[in-house]
Amino acid sequence: MNKKELANAAVEALERVYPDAVCSLEYEKPYELLISTRLSAQCTDARVNIVTKELFAKYPTLQSIAEADLADIETIIKPCGLFHTKARDIIALSQMLIRDYGGELPDSIGELVKLPGIGRKTANLIMGDVFHQPGAVVTDTHCIRICGRLGLISVKDPYKVELALREILPPEKSNDFCHRLVHFGREFCKAQSPQCTVCPLLGICEQHLDFKK
């Protein structure tokens, strides 16, 4: 199989295993997904979901977050780690959204990455989940690890991974594929001790050749 055929096979296999491609971060408003993703850096989505429940209950609007006391935001989000930087970014991006974008999320990667603390990974997630734009590729650790093991990519730099996957993934399925990779990475293709013997992608995985030896 060439890489496009391999990518299609992986997409179809994960569609069967995980019919519901859902983001593991819980949110109600678009800006909440933006903030949750910022908090998820070097933190589990499960912990972020616990923290944001308190954060968004106390600060239920974008305006209230923009006007929040930095120390209070730091206290709430401390369990997510890197809380000094994350708290500053959350307040600053909220202020910028109100000041420059009328309180709405911009609908392009170029504009999203202008927001404090927001990189291409988060911008792609917003483009896919909020704006439902085809071709969104979220290059988190699961995506990079699993696509490397599958033989879809040969690089690890997130931006290069994004570009490489855009060339071979069906654009209309790329965002959901990335969501499914998160679930697959947690259940089967773990960073340590991957569950190769029961892996639903074993037949198409480049790594399975080494396993069979």
Image (cartoon, rainbow, N blue to C red):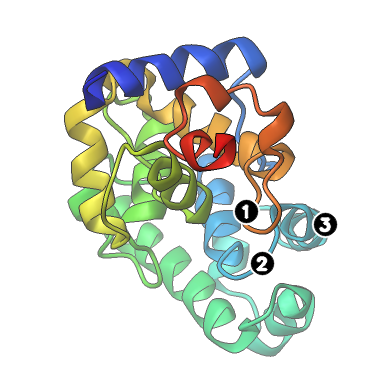
**Residue pointed to by mark 1:** 61
Check the image and report above or below for 10 versus 80. Answer: above
Q: Is residue 192 visible?
A: yes
**Residue pointed to by mark 2:** 43
What residue is drawn where x is 60% and y is 56%? 36
Among the two numbered marks 3 and 1 on one chain, the one whose residue lies closer to the N terminus? 3
Among the two numbered marks 2 and 1 on one chain, the one whose residue lies closer to the N terminus? 2
Question: Helix, strand, or loop for circle 1?
Answer: loop
Q: Amino acid at mark 2?
A: Cys
Question: Helix, strand, or loop for circle 3?
Answer: helix
- Foreground mark, 3 or 1, reads 3
Picture quadrant of residue 23: top right
Q: Along the horizontal axis of the image, is 54 left or right of 202? A: right
Q: Amino acid at mark 1?
A: Thr
Where in the figure is residue 164, as x and y percent of width and height? Answer: 20, 42
- Foreground mark, 2 or 1, reads 2
Q: CA distance from mark 2 to mark 1?
A: 24 Å
Q: Along the horizontal axis of the image, is 65 left or right of 134? A: right
Where in the figure is residue 105, as x and y percent of width and height? Answer: 37, 46
Picture quadrant of residue 197: top right
On the rendered image, what quadrant is the N terminus found in? top left
Q: Nearer the viewer, residue 195 or 190?
A: 195
Q: Nearer the viewer, residue 49 or 205?
A: 205
**Residue pointed to by mark 3:** 50
Question: Helix, strand, or loop for circle 2?
Answer: loop
Where in the figure is residue 137, as x and y percent of width and height? Answer: 34, 39
